[in-house]
Structure formats: structure tokens, C-alpha cells
Image (spheres, helix red, strand yellow):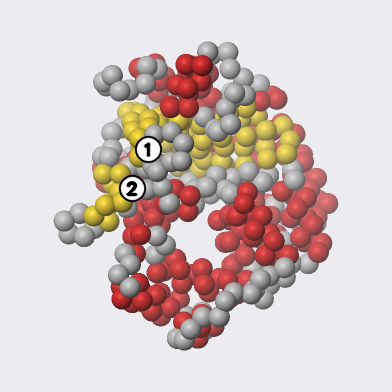
Amino acid sequence: MNARYPAIASDILKLFAARGADAVDVPVLQPADPFLDMAGEDLRRRIFLTESETGAALCLRPEFTIPVCLDHIHTQSGTPRRYSYLGEVFRQRREGGNEFFQAGVEDLGDKDIAAADARSVADAHALLSLCLPGHDLTVTLGDQAIFEAVLAALGLPRGWRMRLARAFGSAELLAAALGDLAAPTRISALAEPAASLVADADHDALAAHIAAGMEQAGLSPSAGRTPNDIARRLIEKAELRSVRLSSDAFEALERFLAIDVALDEAPAALKEFAAGAGLTLGAALDNFAARAKAISGHGLATGSVRYDAAFGRPLDYYTGLVFEISGPEADRPLAGGGRYDRLLTLLGAGKPIPGVGFSVWLDRIEALREAR
């Protein structure tokens, strides 16, 4: 550790050690494809990209979750395992520096999902309480699994469920998707053979056609969306234009997204919504209730933890819990995290490994400490 590290760094590392999270150090230079494929549109736009001598796409580390998971797979470590980190990440930002410190914990392999989720929220809260004594902290929770269960129970086709699930972390994208669902828009006509490939939903042939066009135009697939991603989006748009949600179902979805209550009231609010809409949310609701009970066991102030049904985080790999913690003086979150049970399999793990974690923005914390 050197003088560039935040002043609070040593205390954070002691907290991590006390909570049984082993320190891990991962390279600054990372393979770019996992981030381009799985991190989400917002982060993809901010990544610093480069290439190796062999032409492989590389990037400066934009966050820690994916690198920590890759390192876990590479070292073939057993689970359950808790990892902690404190180091620099690199993102293009409109405000603040493009190099800044993050700290956090990734909790891999614990099969008690409710307990692991609650521990992640409690650890993030404890870290911020340590760094910002006397500050009032507010925890906002969402649940990707509950949202997707509502979409499935409403009978939405898979294409619409996928689009809405991807938009869940962005209020702007979610509003646009709901607007299209209420009144599907036409897309501009495509030239042949793309138009026929879209009409036939021939994903592989369409992706190959797009890749050839990008190569002819001198565009790198690493510069933005991949040909596979573009092909999938075009086919989805064509399929989605033909879908209209009934007014009753659309109103039910809007009622769900309007739920914003204290966490201890949330299970009852969700049960009441489901009963009123005639929907069955099944295991997603049971898991939500178990998590809420586990979080209450950590002693967080009842009024400081809220459930917002419309709240998500702009990372594509989340599968369940999502959360952020803010202070009254900050217009941006101080900590954020969530559950990512599919991520390690997508990154190459031989068997499914459940995971949940959080990170804190140390530059935002330092700004608040200096303002006092």
C-alpha cells in the first residue's frame, strides 16, 4: 500500500479480515470480452480498450467482480469462499477522475442464498458506517428474480421478458421498453439479405452477415456491440413488434413497479399485489421473504432499508438481489451490489457457483469525509 491509497484503506482491510474475506489481487489488464458480453451497456461504453500483440481484445480493469470470478475459476479454488479487494478501476467518466479506487467483497459458493445476500448488505453497510461515522445511510433493494417472475406470470413472451430484464437497471431504458410494449413501434426497413434473415429468425446467418459487413467497413467487433448481439437485437425487435399486452396485464405491471415500501413491509406488499393481480410468484417470493428476514437479523434500522420494485442496477449479470447504499449528502450511491448466480458458469466454471457481492466507491467516500 502506498500514499495514493485512501487514508481509510487500512481500516477497510482490517474490517474485511475480521469478516473472513480473503484479500485477492487481480491484474489491471484484463480480457475485454467478458466485460463486453456480460457487464451491461453502461459499463461497456466506459471501458478503456486495447489489443495484445496477437490481436486479442484487452481492457483496463473497469470493475472487480468479473476479474475476481475469473481468478477463482483459474486457481480452481474450493467454495464457499469469500474474497475481498481494494484497488483501482478505470472507466471513462464525465465527472471525477477516470482512475479511482473501489473496495468490496465477492461471496462465492454459499448455498444459503438468503444468508449470503443479507451478509453482503450488512458488510457493505458496516464498511460505510466505519468510513462515515455519524452519517445516515439508506439502503435501496430491488430483486431481478421477482421482476422476472412477474413478467413470466403475466404471460409475456420470452423476447419481451429478456428486453425488460435487460432494461431493469435503467429507468430510461425501462420506460422506453414499457412505452414500446404499450404501443409497438415500427423499425426501419432493412436491406436484403438482412431483412429475410431477420424474418426467418436465422440468428447465425444474420450474425455472419453483420460480421462480414463490419469487417468490410473496417469496424472492430470489440468497439461496441458484437455481431451476435446486433443479430439478436434485430430479431427480437421484429418479434416484439407483433406483441401487445392486454390493458389488465399492463396495469398490473405498472402497479408492481410502483411498489416502494420499507423492507419489513415488502413481503406482505408483494403477496397482496400477486393476489390482486391473480399471479403466482412461487419460489421468487419465498426467497425474497427469507432474505428480508435474514437482513432484519443483522440489526439494520427498520426505516433505513427500503424495497423499490422498479430498482435495478445497470449490469447484465445480476440474477436476484440488487442493492445500493446512499447517504443524505450524496446524489450518487456510495455502495452497490447484487447476486450473480449465472456469471461463473458463463465465465467457464465447470459447475454452477452461486455468487453475491458489493463494491464501494472510495472517491465518493473520501469527498464526504473531507467535507466534514
Visible in this render: residue 199?
Answer: yes
Q: Going by the image, does 173 lie left or right of 346?
A: right
Up the image or down, 31 lies above or below 13; here it is: below
Residue 63 image-quadrant placement: top left
* For the residues bearing labels 1 and 2, Cβ distance under 8 angstroms: yes
- Label 2: how many Cα within 10 Å (few below 14, some 14–19, many 20+): some
Residue drawn where x is 33% and y is 73% of the image: 217
**Disc 1 versus disc 2: distance between alpha carbons?**
10 Å
Q: Going by the image, does 34 lie left or right of 309?
A: left
- Of callouts 1 and 2, the N-terminal one: 2
Residue drawn where x is 30% and y is 44% of the image: 60
Indicate the quadrant containing the N terminus: top left, top right, bottom left or bottom right: top left
Three-letter amino acid code at the position of disc 2: Phe
The residue where tag 2 is placed is: 48
Three-letter amino acid code at the position of disc 1: Asn
- Label 1: how many Cα within 10 Å (few below 14, some 14–19, many 20+): some
Visible in this render: residue 300?
Answer: no
* Residue 115 in the image, given as x and y percentages of width and height: 54, 33
The residue where tag 1 is placed is: 98
* Residue 323 in the image, given as x and y percentages of width and height: 57, 37
Up the image or down, 48 lies above or below 358; here it is: below
Residue 3 image-quadrant placement: top left
